[in-house]
Image (cartoon, helix red, strand yellow):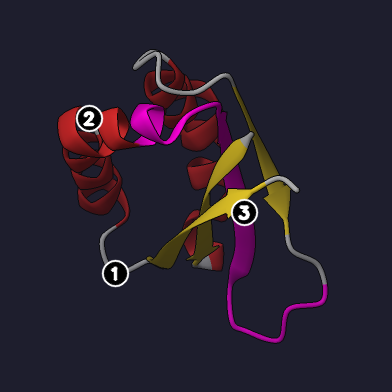
């Protein structure tokens, strides 16, 4: 199993709206792509950065699932996020493999 992990630091001024939008719009839209088997959002605790930091994790079974997502879906979905929360967040992405 693999995990596509997106770590996001979100400004406190939009945190509640962002969480609601992530849970009710963005994450369901990502799951509708059919590339992932499960997802969850976690809050990082004891982070010294400004704002609030979250880990959004999408599970997938084969690298080809992730490649399909990046080729066909990720650009549109990331653009929607950027347009909605421009200058209110920073993010980085990683791929994890379960051992």
Check disc 2: other Cα within 10 Å, few if <14, some if 14-19, many if 20+.
Answer: some
Number of numbered discs overlaid on the protein picture: 3
Instruction: Residue 62: give x, y in percent of width and height.
Output: 48, 29
Q: Secondary structure at mark 1?
A: loop
At horizontal 27% and vertical 46% (from top left) the residue drawn is 84
Asked whether, in this view, residue 74 is left or right of residue 15, the answer is left
Check disc 3: other Cα within 10 Å, few if <14, some if 14-19, many if 20+.
Answer: some
Determine which quarter of the picture holds residue 45. Answer: bottom right
Asked whether, in this view, residue 54 is left or right of residue 86, the answer is right
Image quarter hosting the N terminus? top right
Label 1 with label 3: CB-CB less than 8 Å: no
Determine which quarter of the picture holds residue 31. Answer: top left
Front: mark 1 or 3: 3
Counting residues from the start of the chain, the first of labels 2 and 1 encountered is: 2
Instruction: Residue 67: give x, y in percent of width and height.
Output: 29, 36
Read off the residue under disc 1. 87
The segment highlighted magenta reads 46-66
At horizontal 49% and vertical 23% (from top left) the residue drawn is 36
Q: Residues under labels 2 and 3: Cα distance?
A: 20 Å
């Amino acid at each position: 199993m693999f995990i596509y992990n997106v770590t996001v630091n979100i400004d406190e001024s939009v945190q509640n709206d962002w969480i609601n939008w992530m849970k009710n719009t963005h994450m369901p839209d990502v799951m509708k792509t059919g590339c992932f088997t499960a997802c969850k959002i976690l809050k990082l605790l004891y982070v010294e950065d400004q704002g609030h930091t979250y880990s959004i994790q999408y599970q997938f079974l084969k690298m080809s699932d992730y490649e399909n997502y990046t080729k066909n879906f990720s650009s549109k979905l990331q653009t929607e996020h950027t347009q909605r929360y421009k200058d209110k967040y920073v993010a980085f992405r990683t791929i994890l493999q379960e051992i």
